[in-house]
Amino acid sequence: MAKVLLPAYEQVKAFIKTHISAGTWKPGDPVPSEAALAAQFGISRMTANRALRELTAEGMVTRVQGSGTRVAELHRISSRLTIRDIHEEVIERGHVHTTRVLMVEAEKASADLARSLGLRTGARVFHTMLVHLENGIPIQHEDRYVNPAAAPDFLDTDFTLTTPTHHLLQHAPLTEASYSIEACLPTAQEARQLGIKRGEPCLAMMRRTVSGAHVASVARLIYPGTRYSFAGQFQA
């Protein structure tokens, strides 16, 4: 089968796209001028101009009068789940948020926990366990460990008035966060505190937050599947 030869302007486009996708030319780097492309490919400047115009329309390059053509800042589409205070979520729905405090204490970190928080095994960590209710109905079981270096006054907080999330957002501003969400069955304790059966499906979010040089907290958040849904957005 004969090889299909691309039109000249498509060859120029493919050449430029290859350099961009390979990272040879990075955002902000200059792209060869019309004259240089015309000489390199043995084509007219009009053909080179068409290639650059189409790449501009596709968002691959930017053309600024007086400064030539440069690789565009490429924006990847990413999913974003905003970290919000559950208290604010409930209030926005016009409902009443209350908190049942199950545990507030300092303890020694296990090897796995220490690794997650970037600490040494046996280091002192803060541990809280709460249940959040909406109009008196449990909607979240929160089991959280906090790095004292990120929030030294964490245990002094009255968690019936201020949520752990609110305290951390105020005292250990986020610079990075990661999370995973999966379906699960609750533990016996989680089911009891949420007022559901052991066999009732739940959503489990594992969340790790970073504030500056410190991992601030790791948390296991359990939501009864019939009482809560996650909402996110996609943004360029």
Image (tube, rainbow, N blue to C red):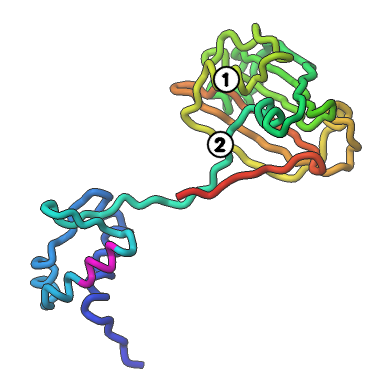
* Secondary element type, mark 1: helix
As drawn, the residue found furthest toward the bottom would be: 1
Residue occupying the far right of the picture: 197
Q: Residues within 10 Å of mark 1 (few under 14, many from 20)?
A: many
Real-space Cα separation, disc 2 to disc 1, in angstroms: 15 Å
Q: Which of 50 and 118 is in front in this view?
A: 50
Residue 184 magenta:
no
Tell me where residue 5 appears, x and y as whole percent: 27, 84
In what element is the residue under mark 2?
strand
Give the extent of the magenta segment: 50-56
Location of the N terminus by quadrant is: bottom left
Q: Which mark is residue 178?
A: 2
Residue 168: numbered disc: 1
What secondary structure is the stretch in magenta mostly built from? helix
Q: Quick check: 138 above or below 202?
A: above
Query: x and y percent of residue 236 in the render?
Result: 45, 50
Q: Identify the residue at horizontal 80%, vertical 38% (top origin).
A: 224
Mark toward the viewer: 2 or 1: 1
Residue 52 located within the stretch drawn in magenta: yes
Q: In this view, does 236 lie above or below 202?
A: below
